[in-house]
Amino acid sequence: MKSFINSYYNRVKNLYLKYEHLLMSVTLVGGFLFDFILFVHIDIPFKFAVLTVYWIVAGLAIAFMQLYDAGKISERFKYLQLFMPLALQWTFGGLLNISLIFYWFSSAFSVSWPLLAATVALLLFNDRFRHQFSRPLVQIGVYFFVTLALFSLVLPFWFASVSAWLFIAATAASVIIFAIYIYGLAFLAGRLRSSTHQLFILVIIIAAIMQVLYFTNIIPPIPLAMREAGLYHSLHITGGKYTMQAEPESLWQDLQDAVFGQTVHVVPGEKIYLYTAIFAPANLKTTIVHHWQYYDEGQKKWVDQGDLSFAINGGRPEGYKGYSWQTNLAAGKWRVYVENQRGQVLARVRFTVEKVEAPVELQEIIR
């Protein structure tokens, strides 16, 4: 009977190993699509509840795999051990995907690309080098990264603040939890005792790198996120509605604007408005800054043209509306950084000013 059970297990294992790459890819893509669809249709508290479940399952999966390999768990659970990498793949993929979504929509790619690139690299590593996830160093390293990313998302929502102290608190909490987790796992699975210091040093290194990225403003000002930004020739507010005049553009022109920046045709003395809608969680109050810059061809550098700020109150799904303006814009390249008070960048709006003698055709847009 025992030989029959072992033979059946070996057949299942061989079948699993034969299609492991496909299963891992399907798990990753399925996790991404599931998370993307789910997160579009549920509210913020439930999103964090799902992420918390992912986080707990990932921690349990790592502990189970390490304890089983150390001989601390009965072989009766060998089927669970065989398929446990799929559970870890799903949860790591889900946590990284959601972190990527939050970071992507909360930042300008030109500023936060190192963090986004690191997250994408971990997603690719998660699929292509899946066999490495049996190594404790890799498991703990990725798990700590997603833990810190999760905590840095949750705390600003809980406290309705974008204070730097919350990121420091998220880092400190993550390090303390992992110190307990690593040494607890080493105590239960004796095979890890020789590498506990190495694992903890890895955690400290990742925490230090994330602090550097945050305080050099490469990490975006989560949970703030840009909903919309555009340049307009006039702007009036009536009953909370923004009525604006914009140059009509085709879909192809919209796509070009996304890549190369908008072209604005300006008559002498005309005022140009930058309108932004920024999402922030309920009860969060902060200040948004529009930092205008002009590229001086003579000096070959960007020249500051002034900062204009306004306060926002969170809670609107469509984003809190605000605007700034400039008059008598010089012809040439312009850009506006949309930032919080610490200088963390939500978006960079690029555009080119062309001088014209007569006003161009405009269309009315209401937001």
Image: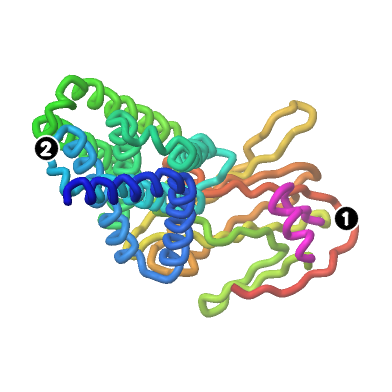
| Residue holding disc 2 | 72
Instruction: Please say if 44 is above or below 14.
Output: below
| Count of marks, rendered view | 2
Extreme residue toward the bottom, this view: 239
Instruction: Please say if 256 is above or below 121.
Output: below
- Residue drawn at 41 percent across, 47 percent down: 96
- Residue drawn at 51 percent across, 34 percent down: 114
Q: Taking 38 as reference, is 109 left or right? A: right
Residue 56 image offset from top left, x and y in percent: 23, 51
Tag of residue 356: 1
Q: Earlier in the sequence, mark 1 or mark 2?
A: 2
Residue 177 appears anywhere in the view:
no
Nearest to the observer: residue 20 or residue 152? 20
Graded by Cα atoms within 10 Å as few (under 14), some (14 to 19) or many (20 or more), the crowding at tag 1 reads few
What amino acid type is highlighted by mark number 2?
Lys
- Residue drawn at 27 percent across, 61 percent down: 49
Graded by Cα atoms within 10 Å as few (under 14), some (14 to 19) or many (20 or more), the crowding at tag 2 reads few
Q: Is residue 63 magenta?
A: no
Residue 124 image offset from top left, x and y in percent: 49, 40
Instruction: Please say if 182 is above or below 32.
Output: above
Q: Taking 1 as reference, is 225 left or right? A: right
**Residue interval drawn in magenta:** 250-265
- Marks 1/2: CA–CA distance: 78 Å
